[in-house]
Amino acid sequence: MTLSILDLAPITSGHTAADALRNTLDLARRAEEYGYSRYWLAEHHFAPGVAGSAPAVLIALVAAATSTIRVGSGAVQLGHQTPLSVVEQFGLIDALYPGRIDLGIGRSGQRRAELAKGTTFEKKDARIVDGLLIPPPFDWSRLAKHPHLTHYATLLQQPGAQTPDFAGQIDDVLAFLNGTHEAHAVPGEGADVQVWILGSSGGQSAQVAGERGLPFAANYHVSPSSVLEAVEAYREAFKPSEALAEPYVIVSADAVVAESQARARDLAKGYGLWVRSIRTGAGAMPYPAAEEADAHVWTDADRELVKDRIDTQFVGTPGQVAERLRVLRRVTGADELLITTITHGHDDRVRSYELLAEAWNRP
């Protein structure tokens, strides 16, 4: 199937990290049963509502709880780790679960530092491209300068540490894996892991993925305004490699599916408040129940802050969401779609993925 899952291991209000991790293991088993291709875990830090701070650990647990589905990172952040440590971690997992592990790599740590130094923000209007909404861009530079985030960045590295150029780090990862580095990663060298690059724009991540001939994951669910530029830049930069003869793209999307549109909208009520907590610099809050979301008094500034994410979330019946996702796939030319679903109730989240899989596979 050309649908995969990105799981943030969300902690919902009234529940614990242990609950979230048990839910992740249960959802991964169900995803395998429903026929999803991959199950990726994200990396987030200092977020009260997210339990996925150590993706390699969680990937190992998910791989142990499943048997056939590919399991990986979406994404490990190289701004916080060295290439050697990443290869050793994933080589260790691959030693027990060979041929099932995806090493998705991102550069958000470096990107955040660049934004904090100041960039020119280009305002654009919303547009519809062949049926797909491309909203105005969000000004990330304001969030990158938030004092909480700048302080947290210092805690994710050793004092005085400087992150090397991303392209060089990727080259080191590949060299450790294929055994051409002067040092040898054990375990890691020769590991049968699939290396992916994740990116939100047409910048360095897309360029590096294309030039190294690696598969690329583009963000519609976090940065919907730049998804087309990202996939275009990747394809333009692509050079065939031992890994790929042609470009291969997966595009992410937020979705909530239920038997009725009204029920789906009710399940998705907490999403805006949750995005607001991230974009105000507080970190992802425990995912709110519908009644908590209803109790929030929204300001115009609040609504503007989350509008692009609300407008690009796919919410509705199985047929409605599947149809809109097919538009996303067609317009971006994606080979796969990577679906993130968060609801307050775990059973509702599982059911959403089940309904989507059924609708997607229906002739």
Image (cartoon, helix red, strand yellow):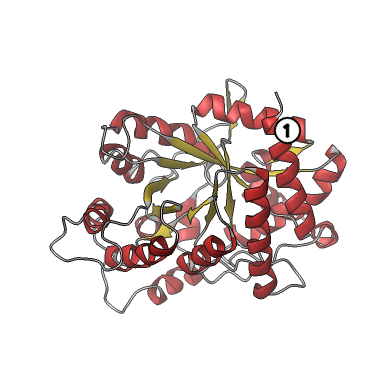
The residue located at (35%, 40%) in the rendering is 206
Residue 213 placement (x, y as % from top left) = 29, 38
Q: Quadrant of residue 216?
A: top left
Instruction: Please state the total of marks drawn on the protein image.
Output: 1
Amino acid of disc 1: Ala
Residue 53 is at least partly visible in this image: yes
Q: Nearer the viewer, residue 103 or 237?
A: 103
The residue located at (37%, 55%) in the rendering is 107
The residue sitting at the bottom extreme is 159
Residue 117 placement (x, y as % from top left) = 35, 58
The residue located at (35%, 61%) in the rendering is 78
Residue 226 placement (x, y as % from top left) = 47, 37
Q: Residues within 10 Å of mark 1 (few under 14, many from 20)?
A: some
Residue 85 placement (x, y as % from top left) = 32, 68
Q: For mark 1, what is the residue? A: 359
The residue sitting at the left extreme is 182
The correct choice, above or below, for 316 with respect to 66 in the image is: above
Q: Nearer the viewer, residue 42 or 290?
A: 42
The correct choice, above or below, for 107 with respect to 240 in the image is: below
The correct choice, above or below, for 254 with respect to 247 in the image is: below
